[in-house]
Image (spheres, grey):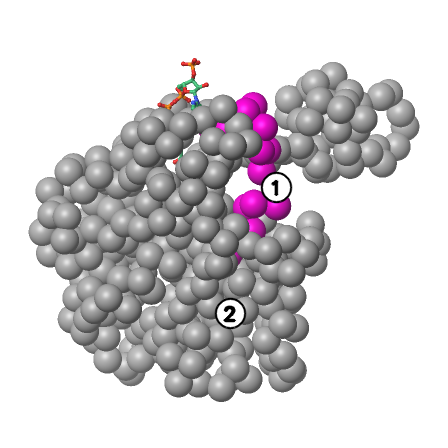
């Protein structure tokens, strides 16, 4: 009997603290008008520093997803964790989540994914393959971010900082013999623009890609420098983004990768019951909606409330849509994402 894979439970968590555009106006030169006009964002959530982390938020989302799937946490045999804001450089958040959830059985394994905004799509595709081969039976897939710990809250960082928010989303992926579930997944990358949306320092690059002078690496026999004085003094320690290039590429790649999934399954954009796009920018989602000829009712957007939560954005939006009764048995749900790397992907799910 052919095994299909399905999403058996969903959950999300966003921190309590709401940070409005007006709050950001107080710490940097920006305006509510600029942010809303360019991105659609009104508020975002920030976790409690020192109390909440990417892992603790993921644990809250995962606990809900596990409960909704009707399984015991000890049934989870594989954890896939997508984030660009991990608690530690290493080990990854997957094992920290395993510890946080107290999953103690000996068969468990954990994998971290570093694919930024498309991390959840990459994770879903990996989970789908492992389920279909019969290797795992209860995969916990999470996307979570604690961006607020690593943003530049001065005017210099405003083009990045105003966009991002914290949160976590989780899904349990299980095998099923029913027809449907995850129909297809499509993944892509193009490393030629790696630095156009990136968090470069500190790192182990030693100046290789961009020139060691930029980072102030001294001549020496052994590397041994993770963070140079120049990086620190010049505050070259925050994410950077070429917003216009990201925007232009995103509006091409989103429709392309969705069309690829439709072509593979012989479906049309009008067959899509609900599109849940990565919440990069409301203008990007609106462009994609128009290109595919979808109505407002066929696209789920929540960036207005949460900002861009990177790897968490698709599972948070999907969970919200499911909770609102917008994802029902038989529906064709399309997920799509684009982001840093550049990496992008799509999935089509016949909900069961
Ligand atoms: O998941 C993928 C993540 N990233 C994205 O999806 C981002 C895609 N890109 C975008 O959403 C847009 O490019 C942004 C919203 C980031 C920026 O919008 P833009 O229309 O591309 O603006 P820009 O970067 O070209 O900047 C226009 C002006 C500049 O001032 P000058 O040089 O014209 O005087 C910026 O300094 O807006 C200024 N600016 C701001 N002003 C007020 C940049 N950020 C801000 C800000 N508040 N927060």
Q: Residue 117 in the image: x percent, y percent?
A: 44, 46
Contact check, label 2 and label 1, Cβ < 8 Å: no
Secondary element type, mark 1: helix
Q: Is residue 337 visible?
A: no
Secondary element type, mark 2: helix
Q: Residue 72 in the image: x percent, y percent?
A: 49, 86
* Foreground of the two, 101 or 183: 101
Which segment is the magenta one? 144-160
Q: Residue furthest top?
A: 213
Q: Residue 81 in the image: x percent, y percent?
A: 53, 60
Q: Residue furthest right?
A: 221
- 228 to 105, vertically: above or below: above
Please tell me how crowded label 2 is: few (under 14), some (14-19), or many (20+) other residues with Cα within 10 Å: some
- The answer to whether 239 appears left or right of 270 in the picture is right
* Quadrant of residue 291 within the rendered picture: top left
Please tell me how crowded label 1 is: few (under 14), some (14-19), or many (20+) other residues with Cα within 10 Å: few
Q: Residue at x 38, y 79 (%)?
A: 68
Q: Which residue is mark 1?
A: 150
Looking at the image, how many numbered discs can be counted on the residues?
2
- The answer to whether 141 appears left or right of 217 in the picture is left
| Residue 145 forms part of the magenta stretch | yes
Q: Which residue is mark 2?
A: 60
Q: Is residue 297 visible?
A: yes
Q: Residue 143 in the image: x percent, y percent?
A: 47, 58
Q: Residue at x 53, y 28 (%)?
A: 28
The quarter of the rendering in which ligand 1 is drawn is top left
- 107 to 97, vertically: above or below: below
**Sequence-first disc among 2 and 1:** 2
- The answer to whether 182 appears left or right of 237 in the picture is left
Q: Residue at x 45, y 63 (%)?
A: 13
């Amino acid at each position: 009997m052919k095994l299909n894979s399905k999403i058996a439970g969903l959950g999300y968590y966003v921190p309590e603290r709401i940070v409005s555009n007006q709050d950001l106006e107080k710490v940097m030169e920006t305006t509510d008008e600029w942010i809303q006009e360019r991105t659609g964002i009104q508020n975002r959530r920030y976790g409690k520093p020192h109390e909440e982390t990417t892992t603790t938020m993921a644990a809250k989302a995962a606990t809900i997803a596990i409960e909704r799937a009707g399984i015991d946490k000890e049934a989870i045999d594989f954890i896939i964790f997508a984030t660009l804001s991990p608690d530690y450089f290493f080990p990854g958040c997957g094992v920290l989540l395993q510890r946080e959830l107290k999953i103690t059985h000996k068969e468990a394994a954990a994998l971290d994914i570093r694919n930024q905004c498309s991390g959840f799509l990459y994770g879903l595709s990996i989970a789908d393959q492992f389920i279909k081969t019969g290797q795992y039976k209860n995969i916990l897939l999470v996307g979570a971010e604690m961006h607020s710990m690593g943003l530049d809250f001065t005017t210099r960082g405003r083009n990045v900082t105003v966009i991002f928010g914290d949160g976590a989303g989780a899904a349990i992926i299980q095998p099923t013999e029913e027809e449907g579930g995850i129909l297809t997944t499509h993944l892509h990358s193009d490393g030629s623009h790696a630095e156009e949306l990136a968090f470069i320092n500190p790192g182990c690059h030693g100046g290789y890609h961009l020139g060691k002078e930029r980072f102030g690496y001294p001549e020496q026999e052994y590397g041994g420098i993770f963070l140079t004085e120049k990086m620190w003094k010049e505050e070259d320690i925050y994410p950077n983004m070429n917003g216009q290039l990201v925007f232009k590429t995103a509006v091409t790649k989103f429709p392309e990768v969705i069309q690829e999934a439709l072509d593979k399954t012989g479906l049309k954009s009008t067959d899509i019951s609900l599109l849940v796009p990565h919440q990069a920018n409301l203008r990007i989602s609106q462009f994609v909606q128009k290109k595919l000829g979808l109505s407002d009712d066929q696209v789920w957007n929540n960036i207005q409330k949460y900002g861009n939560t990177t790897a968490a954005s698709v599972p948070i939006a999907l969970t919200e849509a499911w909770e609102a009764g917008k994802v029902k048995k038989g529906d064709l749900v399309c997920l799509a994402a684009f982001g840093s790397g550049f990496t992008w992907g799509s999935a089509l799910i016949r909900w069961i």
